[in-house]
Image (spheres, rainbow, N blue to C red):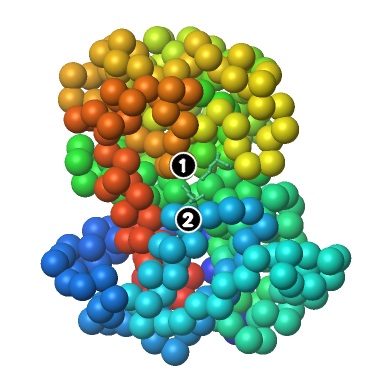
């Protein structure tokens, strides 16, 4: 336990040097275990003797399995629970949950409906809290995405990333890291599903190169990376309205052709082929989605190592 645990709540709250250290640690760890069985521990086993608790208020495949595999590779352990099975699910204050879990585990990852609950958990916890997705942001995903971009295209600094579609939690975390890591972010979203204005204002105040419009062609023109996400996120109730408003924002081959000739495509998954992206793009040669999914594991090991004070 620590009086000042290293929480991983949002990328805008971290120093650029911390984000860089996490990315470099992830590259090193991934390279060091190339060809190893997936269950074998890293040689430094920085999670040895540590337990991560995971709380899920929403469904998950990648986040759940990658954090579990990550802790095993770091030599630690996990306890996983859906929030509905906890007293939290029937109204026990999240502050009390934080105090109890802080006595039993070394870090807590939460996937929460309301971002405020992630913040409240962190305020009362004496161990690191990790945001495994909220309605407002998805910082672990964007670390994996940046790792994937750097593996395939070199440093993100100076690159142009184009995010096309819903101005949602994934879009927000791309905004949060832009000024920290020095990439340009062009966002194209319909006015009704625009990115968070506070996020845009913060990025501008930090001299981040973040530009938002409702023109996908303009956003993608000359980009190094094209990114999209589902049009209907977990918790969204306006399914039909979203599909109507977002239809002009589908990433198809014509749109990809406006990006650089060696541009790559990212999607955090799960994807809805035929909605936000065509089969030809997501399953085509520019798509890096499987490396991106694998990199959830590598990036999160380094996020955990950072939370444990090992980097
Ligand atoms: N991308 C992502 O977070 O996937 P899951 O919802 O499966 O965890
Ligand atoms: N924006 C999506 C991401 C899923 C990983 C959602 O919140 O459902």
Q: Give how far across and how far down residue 101 sits, in percent.
A: 67, 79
Residue occupying the point 29% across, 16% down: 253
Q: Earlier in the sequence, mark 2 or mark 1?
A: 2
Q: Give how far across and how far down residue 125 sits, in percent.
A: 68, 73
Residue occupying the point 45% across, 18% down: 250
Residue occupying the point 29% across, 63% down: 25
Cβ at disc 2 under 8 Å from ligand 1: yes
Q: Quadrant of residue 6?
A: bottom right
Name the residue at the bottom extreme. 49
Which type of secondary structure does the marked residue at label 2 adopt? Answer: loop
212, 30: nearer the viewer: 30
Q: Quadrant of residue 300?
A: bottom left
- Mark 1 lies on residue: 270
Name the residue at the left extreme. 35
201, 99: nearer the viewer: 99
Q: Using the image, determine if residue 196 lies above or below residue 270.
A: above
- Quarter of the picture holding the N terminus: bottom right
- Mark 2 lies on residue: 61
Q: Quadrant of residue 227?
A: top left
Q: Are marks 2 and 1 in contact (CB under 8 Å)?
A: yes
Q: Using the image, determine if residue 130 lies above or below residue 150.
A: below
- Residue 152 located left or right of residue 55: left
Cβ at disc 1 under 8 Å from ligand 1: yes
């Amino acid at each position: 336990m620590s009086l000042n645990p290293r929480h991983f709540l949002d990328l805008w709250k971290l120093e650029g040097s911390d984000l860089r250290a996490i990315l470099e640690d992830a590259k090193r760890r991934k390279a060091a275990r190339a060809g190893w069985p997936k269950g074998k521990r890293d040689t430094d086993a920085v999670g040895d003797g540590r337990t991560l608790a995971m709380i899920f208020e929403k469904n998950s495949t990648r986040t759940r399995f990658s954090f579990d595999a990550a802790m095993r590779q770091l030599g630690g352990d996990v306890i996983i629970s859906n929030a509905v099975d906890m007293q939290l699910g029937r109204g026990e204050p999240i502050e009390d949950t934080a105090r109890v879990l802080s006595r039993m585990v070394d870090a807590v990852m939460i996937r929460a409906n309301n971002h405020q609950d992630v913040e409240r958990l962190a305020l009362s916890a004496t161990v690191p809290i990790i945001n495994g997705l909220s309605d407002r942001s998805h910082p672990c995903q964007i670390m994996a995405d940046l790792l994937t971009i750097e593996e395939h295209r070199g440093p993100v600094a100076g690159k142009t990333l184009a995010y096309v579609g819903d101005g949602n939690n994934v879009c927000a975390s791309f905004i949060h890291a832009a000024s920290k890591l020095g990439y340009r972010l062009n966002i194209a979203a319909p006015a009704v599903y625009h990115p968070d204005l506070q996020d845009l204002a913060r990025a501008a105040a930090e001299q981040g190169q973040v530009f938002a419009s409702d023109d996908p062609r303009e956003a993608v023109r000359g980009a190094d990376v094209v990114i999209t996400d589902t049009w209907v996120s977990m918790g969204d109730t306006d399914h039909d309205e979203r599909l109507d408003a977002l239809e002009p924002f589908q990433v198809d081959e014509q749109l990809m052709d406006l990006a650089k000739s060696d541009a790559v495509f990212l999607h955090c998954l799960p994807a809805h082929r035929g909605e936000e992206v065509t089969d030809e793009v997501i399953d085509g040669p520019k798509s890096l989605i499987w490396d991106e999914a694998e990199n959830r594991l590598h990036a999160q090991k380094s996020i955990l190592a950072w939370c444990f004070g090992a980097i």
